[in-house]
Amino acid sequence: MAQPSTHVYSGSFDRTLDTTNPPTTRLAIPSLWRWPHSETDTFLAIPHPDGYIAVLPPARLAALLADISGKKLSDSEAQAVKARIFSEALSFTFDKQGRFVVTADLLNHAGIQGEAKLIGMGDTFNIMTPARWAKFKRETAGENFGEMMRRIGL
């Protein structure tokens, strides 16, 4: 029996924000990442506490929803996290060119103005400023990266 294919979000891509229809701002997902998806697939963009936008593709979104729906209504901490995530998140689909509308709140959270960097994370992807990505790469260079891999068991 054939195994289902696994989609991997890999690589990094420079993108320019599309502001041709103000106040709407759009961003395009690379074709390499969108080919297994249809225009009806729902993604979730979340403002990450570290100052970038984390994007959950349909499979990860489904896993998050399954996990979070199991939290008890009486668990006030779980409910607070749930409210925080979904009140600030953006649920989106993309058009034939891979474009989706991104909110000013998400862009402001990540400090994105004009240019963005899309970073593959395997099963998800992140959107951040080119400067944040450059800083991240410096901090994880050489022996730092090797030590980090050892600490997490890779």
Image (cartoon, rainbow, N blue to C red):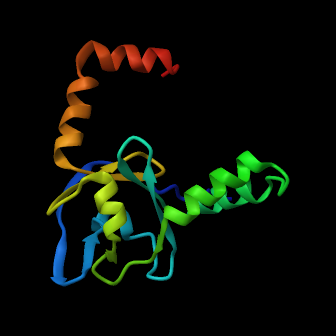
Residue 126 on image: x %, y %:
36, 51
Q: Quadrant of residue 32?
A: bottom left
Seen from the viewer's position, the closer of residues 71 and 84 is 84
Does residue 50 appear in the picture of this structure? yes
Q: Is 68 or 78 nearer to us in this picture? A: 78
Q: Foreground: 90 or 11?
A: 90
Residue 8 visible somewhere in the drawing:
no
Q: Is 28 left or right of 77, judged from the image as shown?
A: left
Which residue occupies 20% across, 84% down?
Answer: 22
Residue 114, placed above or below residue 72:
below
Give percent across and percent down for residue 94: 38, 78
Q: Does residue 69 appear left or right of residue 97 in this picture?
A: right
Q: Position of residue 20 (x, y in %)?
A: 15, 83
Q: Quadrant of residue 61?
A: bottom right
How many numbered marks, from 0 up?
0
Of 59 and 61, nearer the camera is 61
From this viewpoint, which residue is outermost toward the bottom?
21
Task: Point out residue 140 in the picture as x, y percentages from the top left corner.
Answer: 28, 24
- Residue at 17 percent of width and 78 percent of height: 19
Q: Quadrant of the N terminus?
A: bottom right
- On screen, residue 62 versus residue 21, left or right, reads right
Q: Is residue 11 above or below residue 149?
A: below
Please give the name of the residue rendered at 36% of the width and 62% of the height, measured from the top-left corner.
Answer: 106
- At horizontal 72% and vertical 54% (from top left) the residue drawn is 79
